[in-house]
């Protein structure tokens, strides 16, 4: 009887030859007998990552998929290890033939060559050209913001920022569809910084959706305000402007869409209150820092059922974030907004990745006293004297 290692060697040799001869399509591993819980299959394909060839493994579990990329030699070694009584069936697909490895229950090893199921090689691209709402070509503002070069090619060091901009616009595009159409949309980006999102949103509204829009970026740093205004003027974005000042002092009257991404601590509350007072159709914030509530949690030391968690600093920090943002969402509901809270971007970009969205209910039922009672109960449970957003909106007194 031919032993397992000999058959495994033949299979691995075929994999190496197919990669070398450029006939490799993919590998499928099945009939898992290993110890990892809920692992079902592994699928392997060839990819290019920054012009380097790798093997991409998709680990398929009962309820999720996990993708890991390996150098070719390391990937081949992993396949060999998998065939050592973990996966009992493996199929190598090439454009020349398909090779099936079977470890049968009676310890007989079968290696069977079949006609190829694939006639062409798949593209070995990791991040295939995706259709993005904000394309990189023909966008002078992206070049001036150092996202692309003059030819519209995304600069290597700006790849993450470009993806992040498109991810933001993708989220906002779906939210904008939920609000009423307006003759002219008045949009305010609170704490606009260097204006990456502000420019992209204006571009999307005016040049993609073809709507009339007035977009204002509010930024405290005068140098960034001057830079962004100069770029807006140079690129012909006539209804895009940037104002120097604080969120707290900005006059938001007439605003339809208010955005504040990563406004620190209570600046997020200032932004939300500006949106509420303006009766904005859409309020979108991504909070950063949660010091105001955390200080009260630490000072009050109120005993509750979560004591076993909050004795650890890291859990106390997370609780402060959840409580702060949870009350923000309830206050928005109190003022007639339908709320959503979700993760909006991976930790690879920023550890602060929660977005709070308020969409104005077009059929208001009046201030919700039940929500007000929930806010009071939450504050009492956690020993909170007041939330800054309460103070700003005037619904409760400290």
Image (spheres, helix red, strand yellow):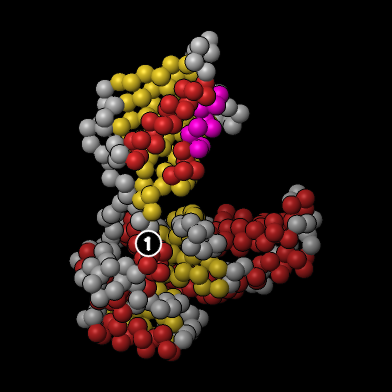
The residue that disc 1 covers is 163
In the image, 379 versus 203, the foreground residue is: 203
Position of 395 relative to 306 (above/below): below
- The kind of secondary structure element at disc 1 is helix
Is 365 situated left or right of 25 in this image? Answer: right
Whether residue 373 is visible, yes or no, is no
In the image, 82 versus 393, the foreground residue is: 82
Q: Position of residue 80 (x, y in %)?
A: 50, 32
Q: Position of residue 6 (x, y in %)?
A: 49, 23
| Residue located 37% across and 18% down the image | 112
Number of labelled discs?
A: 1
Residue 398: say if magenta.
no
For label 1, the crowd category at 10 Å Cα-Cα, with few meaning under 14, some 14 to 19 and many 20 or more, is some
Tell me which segment is drawn in magenta: 77-88
| Residue located 33% across and 21% down the image | 113
In the image, 157 versus 187, the foreground residue is: 157
Residue 79: say if magenta.
yes
């Amino acid at each position: 009887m031919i032993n397992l290692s000999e058959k495994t060697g033949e299979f691995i040799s075929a994999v190496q030859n197919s990669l070398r001869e450029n006939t490799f399509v993919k590998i499928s591993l099945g009939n898992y007998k290993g110890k990892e819980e809920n692992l079902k299959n592994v699928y392997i394909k060839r990819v290019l990552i920054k012009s380097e060839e790798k093997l991409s493994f998709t680990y398929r579990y009962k309820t999720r998929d996990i993708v890991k990329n390996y150098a070719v030699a390391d990937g081949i070694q992993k396949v060999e290890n998998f065939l050592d009584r973990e996966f009992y069936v493996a199929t190598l697909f090439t454009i020349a033939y398909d090779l099936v490895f079977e470890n049968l229950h009676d310890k007989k090893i079968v290696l069977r060559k079949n006609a190829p199921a694939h006639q062409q090689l798949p593209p070995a691209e990791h991040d295939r050209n995706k259709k993005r709402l904000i394309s990189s070509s023909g966008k002078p503002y992206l070049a001036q913001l150092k996202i692309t070069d003059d030819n519209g090619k995304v600069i290597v060091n700006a790849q993450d920022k470009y993806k992040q901009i498109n991810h933001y616009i993708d989220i906002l595009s779906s939210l904008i569809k939920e609000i009423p159409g307006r003759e002219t949309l008045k949009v305010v980006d609170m704490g606009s910084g260097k204006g990456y999102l502000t420019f992209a949103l204006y571009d999307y509204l005016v040049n993609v959706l073809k709507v009339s829009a007035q977009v204002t970026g509010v930024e405290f740093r005068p140098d960034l305000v001057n830079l962004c205004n100069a770029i807006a003027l140079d690129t012909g974005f006539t209804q895009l402007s940037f104002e120097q000042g604080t969120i707290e002092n900005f006059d938001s009257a007439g605003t339809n869409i208010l955005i504040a991404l990563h406004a620190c601590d209570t600046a997020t509350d200032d932004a939300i209150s500006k949106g509420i007072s303006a009766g904005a159709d859409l309020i979108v914030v991504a909070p950063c820092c949660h010091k105001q509530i955390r200080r009260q949690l630490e000072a009050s030391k109120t005993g509750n059922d979560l004591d076993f968690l909050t004795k650890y600093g890291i859990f106390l920090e997370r609780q402060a974030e959840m409580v702060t943002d949870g009350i923000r969402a309830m206050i928005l509901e109190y003022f007639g907004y339908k709320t959503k809270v979700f993760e909006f971007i991976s930790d690879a970009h920023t550890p602060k990745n929660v977005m709070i969205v308020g969409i104005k209910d077009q059929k208001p039922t009046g201030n919700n006293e039940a929500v007000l009672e929930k806010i009071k109960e939450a504050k009492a449970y956690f020993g909170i004297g007041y939330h800054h957003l309460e103070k700003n909106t005037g619904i409760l007194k400290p």
